[in-house]
Image (spheres, rainbow, N blue to C red):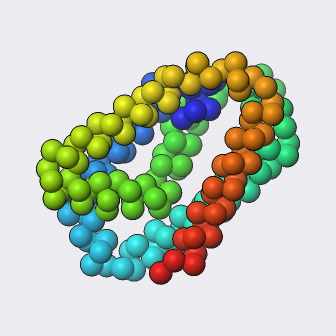
Amino acid sequence: MLRQGLKRRHVGWVVFICTLIDVLLIGFGIGGMGALIARVPALLGVIRWVGAVFLFLYGLRAFYAAWKGPGHLHTENGESQTVLSAVSTVLALSLLNPHVYLDTVVLLGGIGARYGWLGNAWFTAGAMCFTALGFGARLLHPLFEKDISWRVLDVIVGIVCGGTAGALIVSR
């Protein structure tokens, strides 16, 4: 979402899809999906391994981007990203991340099912953060015009993704 906001391309779509995914997953959690995952440990195991592979590969992509260097805010060969490409990317990053299920379905869904309005309050706060990140990213544009900022961000993303993938692999 940060990249889309900085590029000022398809931000509304990205924010809308991220918010919709949160609403749906929290709704599934409140509706009992968290209990289903707790009862069928194999489902969580599949999510964990698919997520670990995805995060590992995404982390490698981030390290490659940090090594490659300039061009983060510029399109390659003058081509611009399509809405379909932006939507596909946000869907993959959202739905292949195992923590989205653990955080929104199990954790927030469990809180929402247990306390009712409190789950909705957490969702509202999260949705506001997504909106601020997507639409507020333009304020960070001067910082991210510098290549070093992108390199540092990509290295941090690579470390976090790799560490999370490793933690998923060794967790039970």
Q: Position of residue 17 (x, y in %)?
A: 41, 37
In percent of width and height, residue 86 lies at 56, 35
Q: Is residue 78 left or right of residue 42?
A: right
In the figure, residue 45 lies in which quadrant?
Answer: bottom left
Residue 6 occupies which quadrant of the picture? Answer: top right
Q: Nearer the viewer, residue 84 or 149?
A: 149
Q: Is residue 166 visible?
A: yes
State the image coordinates of residue 113 (x, y, percent, origin top left). 17, 57
Up-down relation of residue 83 to residue 47 (above or below)? above
Which residue sits at x=63%, y=57%?
A: 161
Q: Quadrant of the N terminus?
A: top right
Is the residue 102 above or below the residue 116 in the image? Answer: below
In the image: residue 52, left or right of residue 131: right
Q: How many marks?
A: 0
**Residue shown at 69% from the left, 48% from the top:** 156
At x 56%, y 43%, the residue is 89
Judged left or right of residue 65, residue 93 is left
| Residue in the image at 84% along x and 38% along y | 69
Can residue 13 be spotted in the picture? Answer: no
Seen in the image, is 110 located left or right of residue 157?
Answer: left
Q: Is residue 32 above or below residue 20?
A: below
Residue 172 in the image: state x and y as whole percent: 47, 81
